[in-house]
Structure formats: C-alpha cells, structure tokens
Amino acid sequence: MNPENFESVFVTNVYSTIANHFDKTRHHTWPKIEDFVLTLNKNSTIYDIGCGNGRNMNIRDDCTFIGCDNNNELLTQAKNKSLTCIYGDNLNLPFEDSCADAVLSIAVIHHFSTEERRIKALSELFRILKPNGRILIYVWAHEQNKFKDFEKNAMVSWNNQLDGKILQRYYYLICEKRET
C-alpha cells in the first residue's frame, strides 16, 4: 500500500469514524499550547494546521485563528463551534507564503508514514510562517511511558466508546535522539 493510501486508511478514515467521540474527549487546550499562544502579540494571525475539532482555536479573543484539517468530520465539529476552518492537506497547504504570525501543529506530523512526507509537512508549516514568526509543533515521542513497548511505526488503539469498536491509528513515534 502506498503511503497516501495507508494514511487514508489508518489515519483519515479512523478519525472520520471517531470524530464524534473524539470531540467529546478532546476539548481542553494543553497548558504549554496555551502558554505559547499567550506569548504572541495582540492581533496575531494563528494558523492551526491539523486543527481537528478546533479545541486550540478559542484561546484568545484578540487574535485571529484559522484552522485547517484534511478530515471533514472533524472540521464539522470545529465549524459547529463557529470557528474559521477550511479543508486542506498539510502536504500542500492552501495558503499563501508567509501569511501566518504563528503556526500550531499539534499531534499531526507523527501521522505521516514516511520521513519524506514528514519533512514535506514540516516544510509547508514553515512556508506559511512569516519571517520572525513562531511555530509550535507537538509529536508523540517514543520515549513517552505509554509508548515504551511500541515500535517506532506504531498502530495505537482507539476505543470508540460510542459504538464499542477498537480502531487502529497509525503513529510514527519520534525519538528524542536521531538514529543514524
């Protein structure tokens, strides 16, 4: 299976299936994300790439948040909260160069199944960032206790409590130290 199809099956389709349950369980902003956003200048334009249900887009009223995700079901959850979100692919973002004062990429990059695709996704984040802009990227780390028994290419279970099904999501677990 090619990487695009693999990610469609084990990332996009899974999140489409679990979107309603995900929205009910993912509504708080993590403290370090809030801290980052609070350091930004007033009237900043903040792009949340891989915004999911939009949980990180209501941190400040004096900034403009623009969300982007490649999952229509999660975007529906965000739009139901009256958030500004559009459909887009992190590998080819539908934005002009240097348009963002800040970029959030929270728990996204680890869903790309090849190094080439992870690098392309990162390059797109930096392409839309203004010179001297700020970026916050979160990925799951292989060193995290919950992943200590996983391979770097991991299938992580989601217990969809709305229908009782266990679904497998793909993660590439990033290592703190690059292996040679």
Image (cartoon, helix red, strand yellow):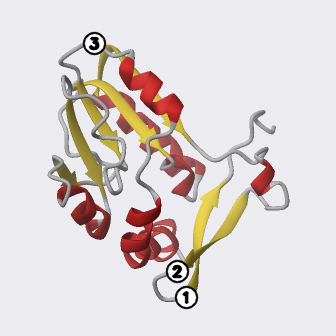
Location of residue 8 (image quadrant): bottom left
Inspect the image, locate mark 3, and give the three-letter code of the amino acid beneath it. Answer: Asn
| SS under mark 1 | loop
Inspect the image, locate mark 1, and give the three-letter code of the amino acid beneath it. Answer: Gly
> Where does label 3 land, which residue?
41
**Which x, y percent locates residue 86?**
18, 53
| SS under mark 3 | loop
Relative to the observer, which residue lies in front, 167 or 111?
Answer: 167
Sooner in the amino-acid sequence: mark 2 or mark 3: 3
> Where does label 2 land, which residue?
161
Q: Are marks 2 and 1 in contact (CB under 8 Å)?
A: yes
**Which x, y percent locates residue 125?**
37, 35
Q: Residue at x 51, y 66 (%)?
A: 3
Tell which residue pokes out farthest to the right in this image.
149
Q: Residue at x 70, y 64 (%)?
A: 154
**Which x, y percent locates residue 15?**
43, 70
Callout 3 crowding tier (Cα within 10 Å): few <14, some 14–19, many ≥20: few
Q: Are marks 3 and 1 in contact (CB under 8 Å)?
A: no
Vertical order, 159 against 110 (above or below): below
Foreground tag (3 vs 1): 1
Q: Residue at x 46, y 32 (%)?
A: 33
Callout 1 crowding tier (Cα within 10 Å): few <14, some 14–19, many ≥20: few
Relative to the observer, which residue lies in front, 38 or 176?
Answer: 38
Image quarter in which the C terminus is found: top right
Q: CA distance from mark 2 to mark 1?
A: 5 Å
Inspect the image, locate mark 2, and give the three-letter code of the amino acid beneath it. Answer: Gln
Please tell me the numbered disc located at residue 164: 1
* For residue 114, side relative to residue 44 (left or right): right
Q: Residue at x 50, y 35 (%)?
A: 137
